[in-house]
Image (spheres, grey):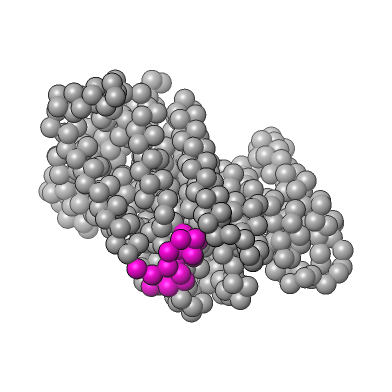
Amino acid sequence: MFFFVYLCKRILESEVMELTILLCFAAYTGLLFLVMWLTGRRGATGNEAFFRAGRRSPWPVVAYGMIGASLSGVTFMSVPGGVLGGQWTYMPLVLGYVLGYAVIALVLLPLYYRLGLTSIYSYLGDRFGAASERTGSLFFIISRLLGSALRMYLVVFVLYEFVFRAWGVPFWVPAVVFIAIILLYTFRGGIKTVVWTDMLQTTFLLLAAVATVVVLLSELGIGWGELMHQASDRGYTRMFETDPSAPKYYWKQIVSGMFITITMTGLDQDMMQKNLTCRTLRDAQKNVMTSSLLFIVVNILFLSLGAALLVYAEQTGFALPVNEAGEVVADKIFPSVAFSLSGFTAVCFVLGMVAAGYSSADGTLTALTTTFCYNFLDFKSPGGSDTKRTRTRRLVHVGFALLYLLVIVAFRPFHRQSLIDTLFDVAGFTYGPLLGLYAFGLFTHRRARDRWVPAIAIASPVICYLLRVFAPIWFGYHFGFELLLINGMITFLLLLLASVNNKPRL
């Protein structure tokens, strides 16, 4: 009660900008709860709605919403900010995404629909055994919990820096508020609600980027073509790194992008659970391929925004944000410029960030609950009391929300630079074993010894970590995102050594 009174007092004393930010946050949150109420009025209810949305989601809605789910707060801020040090060398990675989406549409989705899966890791149980299923599920839980919490952290970080810090409010307070809201609006509807809220979140993410670019062009008094010309002259639009030993060598980026998409989308319960709510396999395939093409356009937009921010800073003398060591903090470039331009761009940025924060966490929280319930608590088995399962599912949902909060708060002292490379590092180590497991299951007829799979899944990332540390010393080579592929290959080879030539169950 004391804190509530204190918060109300600070709101009444707030400057106009701070109050505007809070009102935008409240309005957007209210809009999400309206969507939750509307989606809950008809169709599937209970566990069927939470896990599968009745398998009746319109594919255009899922395709459009996947843009927001894929972007998150990291793309929203780190991709524009990353132009400062990396130019447009992120783009070959995006081109690789299209190849990865094609593999998902033509190889993975037909498998998932043929088996009628709710949790995609049930495939590993059918193919190899219970230890493999739980190993794959656990690696997803660790990877998604860390990755999505860091994305959410970035949103909380910005709101804290620009609003709550001035009030003397601890960092954990906005984190608790965000997690509580996400927990509330996903608690009942689960994936059924997330499919529709993702569409709303995508819209606000894109509007924020477009509005900021338009205002920047107006401030500079130039058009789009002139902006790209100036950005090119400054080297900001350089797309292809041609040094084979560099971490962002373009062929490594393209190949890595393909496998990042296969693993972080095709082998990711969060992303696939939305696709599996489509009515038919054909609808899901149309959704995936449409998303891949839209993703190219959207990333060009965010890279262009990054170039516009830097051109604006150079021409106006705007001081880029720095840390205590005097280094430019890439993740703060976009918010710093947006808040300095006008109240309009500040509002657009806040709405985009709030949308990014929600889209980073709502689907993930639902997917983590689904994975744990199906692959550890065996919800996929027929029978059992639906009332008891609902109670269990809700407890699991709350438990993961608390873990989410713990990761966000614990990461605060370690945030130094752009998070996007950190996230891909996490993915490289945790999704690699999943890539190896699925590749072995799909492309061989051999059967891995199930009891050895957990040890193999741990050994592969350890070997990759040692390669990353010592490769520059031993070979003069720096591993980039392709470490994910190496991790998967090591897992595959170890599984091959620990396999027998028996017919699989599937």
| Quarter occupied by the N terminus | top left
- Residue 115's place in the image compared with 70, above or below, is below
- Closer to the camera, 273 or 92? 273
- Residue 385's place in the image compared with 352, above or below, is below
Evaluate whether residue 386 shows in this view.
Answer: yes
- Closer to the camera, 160 or 197? 197
- Residue 103 in picture, x, y percent from top left: 56, 69
Magenta span: 42-58
- Closer to the camera, 198 or 438? 198
- Closer to the camera, 370 or 459? 370
Q: Quadrant of residue 294?
A: bottom left
Evaluate whether residue 220 shows in this view.
Answer: no
- Residue 266 in picture, x, y percent from top left: 55, 62
- Residue 153's place in the image compared with 322, above or below, is below
Residue 28 is inside the magenta segment? no
* Residue beneath the point at 41% across and 54% down: 188
- Residue 433 in picture, x, y percent from top left: 68, 52
* Residue beneath the point at 81% across and 64% down: 447
* Residue beneath the point at 40% across and 40% down: 179
| Quarter occupied by the C terminus | bottom right
Does residue 168 appear left or right of residue 186 in this picture? left
* Residue beneath the point at 19% across and 40% down: 23
Does residue 131 appear left or right of residue 105 in this picture? right
